[in-house]
Amino acid sequence: MDRLLKRGAAGLLLILALTACSKFIQPDENRLLFGMEPTNELGYEVDSSGTITVESRTLRLSTRAGAPLTTVTGYRVEFRNQNGVLLGATSNVPQSLNITVPAGWQCTTPDPVLGCNAMSEGARPAPGVPATVAGIQDQFLNADIIQMHILAGQPTGWYADVTLFYDNANGAFEQTYRVNIA
């Protein structure tokens, strides 16, 4: 009985130690917050005469609280159907993109372009000011994918995996975000 009690106590101590350590591990501060406006999807419409219109989208990126200024240098998009089958991609090589995403800080007097950083007067960690790029859907949604989607009967579940390549003071990163095609 004493041995079982000691094993149970040791297991409990191990669980408590691991839980305590996890409280000190920050979430990945280098992961950008990604979104599309007005809806978080790549969309198009087909009118009664068969004319295809790609719906306007604006890419919205921001940094997490306390993250450094980040520069997005490229992207790659892979298009997949509802079963995850690869239908096409932009290229094997990342396409060029140049977006500066302000640091995840608030301060008394932010720079109009770069925002705040840890050394700014009155600096405190906060979500970064969003950087937006209008008309990004023309780069992210290929016409051949739209044609394939129409020929397949416009099924639900098709999506694009958008991989962004970026760097900041902590190094170089790549992160993939999923966006539905509608």
Image: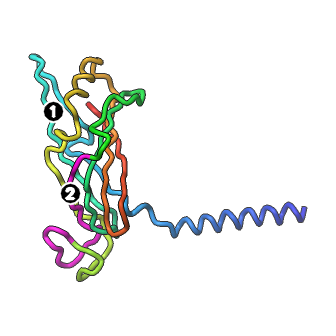
Instruction: Provide the secondary structure element on which disc 2 rests.
Output: strand
The range drawn in magenta is 95-115
Residue 135 lies, with reference to residue 123, above or below; the image says above
* Residue 109 falls inside the magenta stretch: yes
Horizontally, is 87 left or right of 36 in the view?
Answer: right
Name the kind of residue labelled 2 in the image.
Answer: Ile
Q: Given this view, does label 1 or label 2 mark the residue nearer the observer?
A: 2
**Residue 36 image label:** none
User: In which quadrant of the rendered view does residue 51 lie?
Assistant: top left
Query: Which residue shows up at 58% across the image and 68% down it?
Result: 21
Horizontally, is 96 left or right of 3 in the view?
Answer: left
Cα gap from disc 1 to disc 2, whole angstroms? 23 Å
Query: Which residue shows up at 35% across the image and 31% down it?
Result: 80
Mark sitting earlier along the chain (1/2): 1
Query: Which residue shows up at 35% across the image and 60% down it?
Result: 172
User: Which quadrant: the N terminus?
Assistant: bottom right
Residue 177 lies, with reference to residue 24, above or below; the image says above
Q: Position of residue 32 (x, y in %)?
A: 32, 57
Task: State the residue position of label 2.
Answer: 99
Task: State the residue position of label 1.
Answer: 54
User: Which quadrant: the C terminus?
Assistant: top left
Q: Position of residue 144 (x, y in %)?
A: 22, 27
Task: Find the residue positioned furthest to the front.
Answer: 93
CA neighbours of label 1 inside 10 A, class few (<14), some (14 to 19), many (20+): some
Name the kind of residue labelled 1 in the image.
Answer: Val
